[in-house]
Image (cartoon, rainbow, N blue to C red):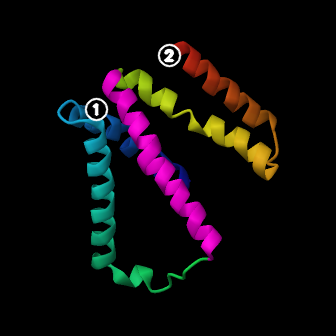
């Protein structure tokens, strides 16, 4: 049950973020917003490292393929996706943009099935139908 509470807390925090970001994007261009966000994540990571370096004692360098995959994921999520998301957020209503952008699990489901051969279950299909229905309702 602890995991569920943590997931709900994460949803709460992530739900607040677009409101803060939309407010900030009223006063600065999208590219500057993405840079400031990336910089704040970097600085927070440095503070975390300096505050508790023992967390990183067991850190091992993964193989080069793992590094490339993680870096590509970070680049696409934190730079490309964030830039597109900020453009949408600054041009539209947060209450519409956030749920549509938040439909990324649908893309992940499809790619997971295609690339990793993940199972298609009734529960997953119902989830996909609900996500698509929600997007249709917001239009």
Q: Residue at x 73, y 36 (%)?
A: 124
Whether residues under marks 2 and 1 lie with C-beta atoms below 8 angstroms apart, the answer is no
Side of 16 relative to 28 (left or right):
right
Instruction: Please tell me whether mark 1 sits on a helix, a strand or a loop.
Output: helix
Going from N to C along the chain, the mark reached first, 2 or 1, is: 1
For residue 72, which quarter of the picture?
bottom right
Are there few (<14), some (14-19), or many (20+) residues within 10 Å of tag 2?
few
For residue 17, which quarter of the picture?
top left
Location of residue 30 with respect to 59 vertically, above or below: above
Q: Nearer the viewer, residue 3 or 46?
A: 46
Residue 2 appears anywhere in the view: no
Q: CA distance from mark 2 to mark 1?
A: 19 Å
Q: Position of residue 28 (x, y in %)?
A: 20, 36
Q: Residue at x 41, y 35 (%)?
A: 85
For the record, the magenta segment spans 63-91
Residue 111 appears anywhere in the view: yes
Q: Position of residue 111 (x, y in %)?
A: 71, 43
Side of 31 relative to 130 (left or right):
left
Q: Residue 121: which numbered mark, if any?
A: none
Q: Residue 22: which numbered mark, if any?
A: 1
Q: Position of residue 12 (x, y in %)?
A: 39, 42
Location of residue 30 with respect to 4 vertically, above or below: above
Q: Which residue is mark 2?
A: 138
Q: Main secondary structure of the magenta part?
A: helix
Q: Nearer the viewer, residue 8 or 51?
A: 51
């Amino acid at each position: 049950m602890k995991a569920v509470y943590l997931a709900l807390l994460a949803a709460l925090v992530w739900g607040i973020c677009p409101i803060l970001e939309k407010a900030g994007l009223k006063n600065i261009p999208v590219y500057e917003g993405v840079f400031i966000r990336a910089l704040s994540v970097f600085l927070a990571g440095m503070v975390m490292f300096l505050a508790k370096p023992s967390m990183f004692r067991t850190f091992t360098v993964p193989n080069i393929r793992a590094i490339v995959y993680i870096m590509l994921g970070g680049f696409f999520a934190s730079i490309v996706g964030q830039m597109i998301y900020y453009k949408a957020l600054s041009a539209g209503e947060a209450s519409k943009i956030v749920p549509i952008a938040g439909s990324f699990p649908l893309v992940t489901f499809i790619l997971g099935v295609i690339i990793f051969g993940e199972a298609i279950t009734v529960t997953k299909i119902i989830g996909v139908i609900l996500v698509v229905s929600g997007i249709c309702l917001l239009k």
